[in-house]
């Protein structure tokens, strides 16, 4: 008998049931140690995977394959990082030039139907799809269609003065047109993506990009009481307010909270990645947090630099072993019970500078399974003892064999 409060609870219960079944002989199946009584519930509501399909294109079939594996591990959020500086593969009915000029090619695009299909496929497996449209940084690709909206377009050779990675380009925060453009993008994709959470990026904003922009310079000359920081605050206020007017809960990277003067609305979800201490620092300010520390949860790291002029480690090396992933605790250094409740969950990330659909299985599994167990079961067993990787190893090996 399976009892659950929601259809998604039934899905998780059936997954648990499937994990009780073992092969017995050539064709037989057996459930050991019956009868079995299990009462189970997730420790965290958000158990996610970030998939970057902008730096390398992933076919719909490969995205669905990721969703299948997520469901086997009771993960319930696909954070779809669908656009970035490198490409805009998703259809836009409002601004079709974005896809036409920003995709890698006609065979590397997502139609509305593709997106709706992924959302439906995910929902059948109890998985939410949260889109990310990163602004105002990481927007070089917008400049391919609308160069008048973007500052510091593809600065060379000193791109690193203007961006975290090439090609450089950020929406021009001195131009009302860039705010209008952002609002139109939010209007369109807030309707296409049905989840109530909408990720608007906000990471790795580079002030030098705007300091040298002639339009920004002119604006600041005409408005001497303003500066780059006040301009950015005003820009954030307008786009966050608009997203709220659309009935969406904003999700943003931690820089908007810690590296700007803007005061986020209290309902905002803050995704932390720079430092593990960012999680307790976020909830101490009263904000909800998703834990994605690069030091433990960035699963694309460990393969060296991807820029062709640098023969060395990448910024986030070394490789994160499954044991390292498992040992991370999203609640570390948070002792207040109310603040612990503000940690909504955990999310591993696979950025796609060196990842595509050929290698995605190796990047994700079984390391994402290690995060999945701690996000579902917590770090402690029924007796209150912290689980060790030695205890987990055989169970993780079994899970890997189930998936392959």
Image: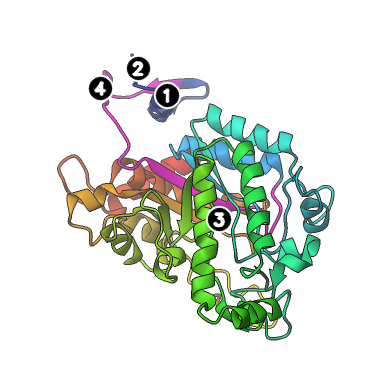
Q: In terms of sequence position, does the residue under pointer 4 or pointer 1 come before the other?
A: 1
- The residue that label 2 is drawn on is 2
Viewer-nearest residue: 105 or 404: 105
Residue 351 location (% of width, % of height): 58, 60
Between marks 3 and 2, how big is the CA–CA gap?
Answer: 34 Å
Residue 159 location (% of width, % of height): 67, 81
- The residue that label 3 is drawn on is 363
Mark 1 residue element = helix
- The residue that label 1 is drawn on is 14
Q: Are marks 3 and 2 in contact (CB under 8 Å)?
A: no
Q: In terms of sequence position, does the residue under pointer 3 or pointer 1 come before the other?
A: 1
Between marks 3 and 1, how big is the CA–CA gap?
Answer: 26 Å
Does residue 239 appear to the left or right of 175 in the view shown?
Answer: left
Between marks 4 and 1, how big is the CA–CA gap?
Answer: 14 Å
- The residue that label 4 is drawn on is 37
Q: In terms of sequence position, does the residue under pointer 2 or pointer 4 come before the other?
A: 2
Question: Is 20 placed above or below 343 here?
Answer: above
Q: In terms of sequence position, does the residue under pointer 2 or pointer 1 come before the other?
A: 2
Mark 2 residue element = loop
Residue depicted at x 42% and y 24%: 14
Residue stretch in magenta:
29-58
């Amino acid at each position: 008998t399976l009892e659950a409060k929601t259809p998604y609870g039934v899905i998780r219960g059936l997954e648990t049931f499937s994990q009780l079944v073992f092969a017995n002989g050539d064709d037989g199946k057996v459930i050991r140690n019956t009868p079995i009584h299990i009462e189970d519930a997730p420790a965290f509501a958000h158990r996610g995977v970030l998939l970057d399909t902008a730096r390398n294109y992933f076919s719909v079939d490969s995205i669905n394959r990721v969703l299948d594996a997520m469901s086997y591990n009771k993960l319930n959020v696909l954070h779809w990082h669908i656009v970035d500086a490198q490409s805009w593969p998703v259809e836009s009915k409002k601004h079709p030039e974005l896809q036409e000029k920003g995709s890698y090619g006609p065979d590397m695009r997502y139609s509305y139907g593709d997106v709706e299909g992924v959302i439906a496929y995910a929902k059948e497996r109890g998985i939410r799809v949260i889109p990310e449209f990163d602004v105002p940084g990481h927007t070089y690709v917008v400049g391919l269609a609308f160069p008048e909206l973007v500052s510091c377009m593809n600065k060379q050779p000193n791109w690193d003065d203007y961006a975290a990675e090439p090609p450089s380009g950020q929406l021009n925060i001195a131009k009302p047109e860039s705010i209008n453009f952002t609002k139109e993008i939010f209007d369109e994709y807030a309707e296409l993506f049905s989840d109530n959470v909408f990720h608007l990026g906000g990471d790795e904003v580079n002030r030098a990009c705007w300091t040298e922009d002639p339009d920004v310079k002119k604006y600041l000359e005409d408005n001497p009481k303003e500066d780059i920081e006040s301009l950015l605050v005003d820009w954030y206020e307008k786009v966050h307010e608009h997203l709220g007017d659309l009935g969406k809960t904003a999700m943003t990277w931690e820089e908007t909270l810690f590296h700007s003067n803007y005061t986020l609305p209290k309902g905002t979800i803050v995704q932390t990645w720079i430092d593990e201490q960012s999680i307790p620092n976020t909830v101490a300010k009263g904000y909800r947090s998703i834990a994605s520390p690069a030091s433990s949860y960035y699963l694309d790291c460990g393969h060296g630099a991807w820029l062709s002029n640098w023969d060395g480690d990448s910024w986030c090396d070394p490789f994160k072993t499954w044991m390292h992933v498992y040992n991370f605790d999203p609640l570390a250094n948070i002792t207040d019970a109310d603040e612990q409740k503000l940690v909504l969950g955990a999310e591993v990330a696979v950025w796609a500078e060196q990842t595509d659909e050929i290698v995605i299985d190796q990047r994700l599994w079984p390391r994402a399974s290690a995060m999945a167990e701690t996000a579902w079961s917590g770090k402690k067993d029924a007796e209150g003892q912290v689980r060790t990787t030695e205890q987990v190893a055989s169970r993780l090996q079994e899970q890997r064999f189930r998936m392959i």
